[in-house]
Amino acid sequence: MSAVLFDLDGTLLDTAPDLRRALNEVLAAHNLPLKTLAEVRPHATHGTKSLLTLGFGEGAFEQETLRQAFWDAYLRDISAETRLFEGVSQLIGALDAAAIPWGIVTNKVTHLTVAALPHFPALDACKALVCGDTLASRKPDPAPLLHAAQLMGVAPGQCLYLGDALTDMEAAQGAGMHGFVASWGYVDDSHPDWPAKAVLAAPEDLLKWCKITRSNS
């Protein structure tokens, strides 16, 4: 394969602890029950709307004051507990060493994404960044993945896409890319039935699909 594209939350970064902190800060301000990490994790991959719905119920995302309060709380300490998933740094290092370009396609909005990424130098070599508000559409629409491939000058059929949500696999399928499930992320129980090339147990498992041997990494 000529290039690799990644989802961000739940694939490269374990952001759930900081998303929980931000959500609980807003919930506390409204005297509402706080959420556990176990409650937040399944929603972390689906972004602000899913998290606010978890905390406040349907329609919460449409309330600008709640949305902005959550974003402000998140930005105040965006990397306090967020970490690269185990094995991600080694995977990225192997891709860089093999001169395989890689990029990120996330539904996370741009201002949150660009605030988070500088805290993780292992991700500095990202060749294409497409966020949830970069285009008029977002995953599961394939357009963001196609745009990222175009930015890297790579044919979609020569790209792998790694993500942890059904929307990721649907977008990859629609873009004509090979989709791989990051089972270490925020996957739900239906993931074995997703339209994916394979379900990976660890980040390094992607290397064989890139034709990189671990001894070379």
Image (spheres, helix red, strand yellow):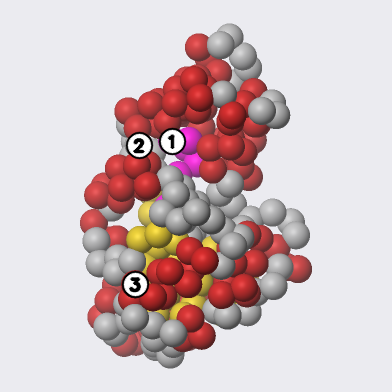
Q: Quadrant of residue 214?
A: bottom left
- The image shows residue 180 at horizontal and vertical percentages of 57, 72
Q: Residues within 10 Å of mark 2 (few under 14, many from 20)?
A: many
Establish if 5 lies above or below 82. below
Query: Is 200 in the magenta?
Result: no
Residue at x 71%, y 68% (from the top left corner):
194
The numbered mark, 1 or 3, whose residue comes first in the sequence reads 1
Do labels 2 and 3 touch, CB within 8 Å? no
| Residue 216 in the image, given as x and y percentages of width and height | 31, 87
| In this rendering, position of residue 109 left or right of residue 151 | right
| Residue annotated with mark 2 | 78
Q: Quadrant of the C terminus?
A: bottom left
**Highlighted range, magenta:** 12-19
On the image, the x and y values in percent for residue 37 come to 57, 35
What kind of element bears circle 2?
loop
The residue lying toward the viewer, choosing from 153 and 48, is 153
Q: Residue visible at 34% across and 81% down? A: 153
Q: Secondary structure at mark 1?
A: helix
| Residue under pointer 1 | 18
